[in-house]
Image (tube, rainbow, N blue to C red):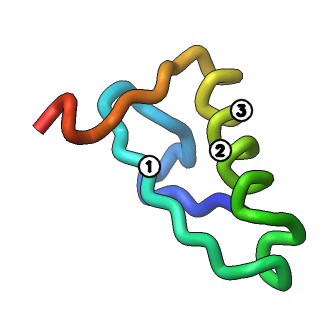
Amino acid sequence: HMEWREWDRDLHPGDIVLTHFRGKGDWKGTMPDMIRLVMKTITDKGYAVAKLEDYV
């Protein structure tokens, strides 16, 4: 599942996405599965993913 901090529960330009992998019991899949889901969610909304170090 995904949790959001913003009231509208959506991504915004400049958002930082923090992920935690808690194991197959919580995620119903592997860490690569979780990463694919997060990446798909981000790109389906029209955003690109970049490294945080490129911005700080």
Q: Quadrant of residue 53?
A: top left
For the residue marked with disc 3, what is the amino acid?
A: Lys
How far apart are the two marked residues, 3 and 2, measured between alpha carbons?
Answer: 5 Å
Residue placed at 80% from the left, 65% from the top? 30
Front one among 33 and 41:
33
For the residue marked with disc 2, what is the amino acid?
A: Val
Assign the C terminus to one quadrant of the image.
top left
Label 2 belongs to which residue? 38
Q: Horizontal and vertical percent for residue 26?
A: 78, 80
Q: Secondary structure at mark 2?
A: helix
Q: Horizontal and vertical percent for residue 38?
A: 65, 44
Confirm or deny contact between disc 3 and disc 2 (CB under 8 A).
yes
Residue placed at 70% from the left, 22% from the top? 44
Question: Residue 40 bears which disc, if any?
Answer: 3
Residue placed at 65% from the left, 80% from the top? 22
Label 1 belongs to which residue? 17
Front one among 5 and 26:
26
Q: Is 55 placed above or below 44 here? A: below
Assign the N terminus to one quadrant of the image.
bottom right
Q: Secondary structure at mark 1?
A: loop
Q: Is residue 15 left or right of residue 54?
A: right
Residue placed at 54% from the left, 70% from the top? 20
Comes first in the chain, label 1 or label 3: 1
Q: Which residue is farthest top? A: 46
Q: Horizontal and vertical percent for residue 49?
A: 46, 28
How far apart are the two marked residues, 2 and 1, measured between alpha carbons?
Answer: 9 Å
Category of crowding for the residue at label 1, using alpha-carbon neighbours closer than 10 angstroms: few (below 14), some (14–19), many (at least 20): few
Confirm or deny contact between disc 2 and disc 1 (CB under 8 A).
yes
For the residue marked with disc 1, what is the amino acid?
A: Val
